[in-house]
Amino acid sequence: MSLNDLIKELRQATSAGVIDCKKALEEAKGDMKRALDLLRQKGAKLAAKKASRAARQGKVESYIHAQGKIGVLVEVNCETDFVAKNEEFQKFVKDVAMQIAAMDPKYIKKEEMHQDIPEEEARELHKHMCLLEQSFIKDQSMTINDYLASLIGKIGENIVIRRFTRYQLGE
């Protein structure tokens, strides 16, 4: 497979820029899996840099699942209304709403949980109860936090899952 084909495939998988894909593939010596990991790491570093910036725009998404038995409202914020209208941002917000409906997290991040739990137990609880720590239902190889970091890396703005509510019939 030529470098151009690999770049094209990596772009389709990540939506990252051509130059970023080329650099990742060169650094990974053509190894697609390693290039994906490098792009994810780059996204996580960029997300950490952007975290202090104010995110006051965004979207409130509603999702109703399975004949109206489960409903979700989620607020996801970004820095500009331009990004709030971006197709990838819109898809992310919809995916997060579906994740909440499917996995029923109780918290957004692990820092919101009570800390009086033994560390080993806490790690397992975080995976189930904290949205950002959960495996993404559409791609089990990454967490919601990984998905968020990669989107921040692509878009270049701070994005924050602000709050959510999940309703289930009979609860």
Image (cartoon, grey):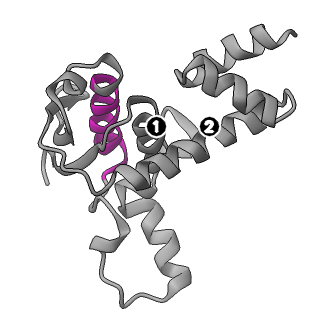
Residue segment shown in magenta: 90-104
Task: Name which residue lies at 27% across and 62% down.
Answer: 107
Determine which quarter of the picture holds residue 35: top right
Residue 49: image tag: none
Which type of secondary structure does the marked residue at label 1 adopt?
helix
- Residue 85 image position (x, y, % from top left): 20, 19
The answer to whether residue 149 is left or right of residue 32 is left
| Crowdedness near tag 1: few (<14), some (14–19) or many (≥20) residues, C-alpha within 10 Å | many
Q: Earlier in the sequence, mark 2 or mark 1?
A: 2
Per the model, the C-alpha gap separating discs 2 and 1 is 9 Å
Magenta stretch holds residue 72: no
* In magenta segment, residue 91: yes
For the N terminus, give its image quadrant: top right
Q: Callout 2, which amino acid?
A: Leu
Task: Please name whichever residue, 6 or 103, is drawn nearer the observer in this view of the structure.
Answer: 6
- In the rendered image, which quarter contains the C terminus? bottom left
Which residue is labeled 2 in the image? 39
Residue at image point 15% right, 32% down: 59
Q: Residue sitting at 32 percent across and 54 percent down?
A: 51
Answer whether labels 2 and 1 touch (C-beta < 8 Å). yes
Q: Is residue 141 visible?
A: no
Q: Quadrant of residue 9?
A: top right
For label 2, the SS is helix
Q: Would you name the residue on which mark 1 appears? A: 153
